[in-house]
Amino acid sequence: QVQLVESGGGLVQAGGSLRLSCAASGRAFSAYAMGWFRQAPGKEREFVAAIGWSGGRTVYADSVKGRFTISRDNARNTVYLQMNSLKPEDTAVYYCAADGVPFRVQPLFYGYDYWGQGTQVTVSS
């Protein structure tokens, strides 16, 4: 089992940047592929980005491609989401998630086994 805690959310103006962090504890972090998802009020949870256990493979939603970067530091048991050129439509609660199949990098939320509590990101226009 693994516990996930997100941080780094906040209020930022459109065009600005934020870096989210997700710290993991419990079972070996490198045993998991990791993903970021987000959920805006009144909308379903949507995939943002995912990264394999080694960091060598990443996948992004089309809506964030070229603006967001997912990375991980297995020595620090942490996954990051660097968000640049933020838009008001990026406003949501952002969640990190762990997939117990470490080489699988996929966007389906039901494939993830563990979830953090979320961190709010608000982008003002």
Image (cartoon, rainbow, N blue to C red):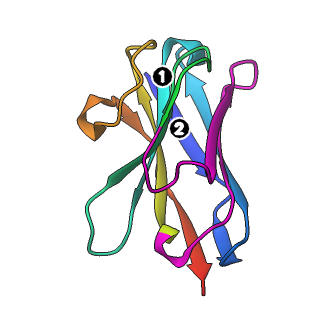
Percent position of residue 10, x then y:
66, 70
Quadrant of the rendering where the C terminus is positioned: bottom right
| Cα gap from disc 2 to disc 1, whole angstroms | 13 Å
Image: 52 above or below 61:
above
Crowd rating for badge 2 (residues with CA inside 10 Å; few <14, some 14–19, many 20+):
many
Residue lying farthest to the bottom in this orientation: 125
> As shown in the figure, which amino acid type bears the numbered disc 2?
Leu
In the shown orientation, is residue 26 left or right of residue 12?
A: left
Q: Residue at x 55, y 16 (%)?
A: 53
> As shown in the figure, which amino acid type bears the numbered disc 1?
Ala
Q: Residue at x 53, y 48 (%)?
A: 65
Residue 50 numbered tag: none
In the shown orientation, is residue 72 left or right of residue 108?
A: right
Percent position of residue 42, x then y:
26, 74
In the shown orientation, is residue 5 left or right of residue 110?
A: right
List the residue tagged with mark 2.
4
Q: Residue at x 52, y 16 (%)?
A: 27
Image: 78 above or below 55:
below
Of residues 45 and 64, the one nearer the viewer is: 64
List the residue tagged with mark 1.
33
- Numbered range of the magenta stretch: 60-89
Percent position of residue 54, x then y:
61, 14
Occupied quadrant, residue 17: bottom right
Q: Is residue 73 magenta?
A: yes
Q: Secondary structure at mark 2?
A: strand
Q: Residue at x 71, y 60 (%)?
A: 18
Query: Which of marks 1 and 2 precedes in the sequence?
Result: 2
Occupied quadrant, residue 98: top left
Q: Is residue 103 magenta?
A: no
Q: Is residue 54 visible?
A: yes
Viewer-side label of 2, 1: 1
Q: Secondary structure at mark 1?
A: strand
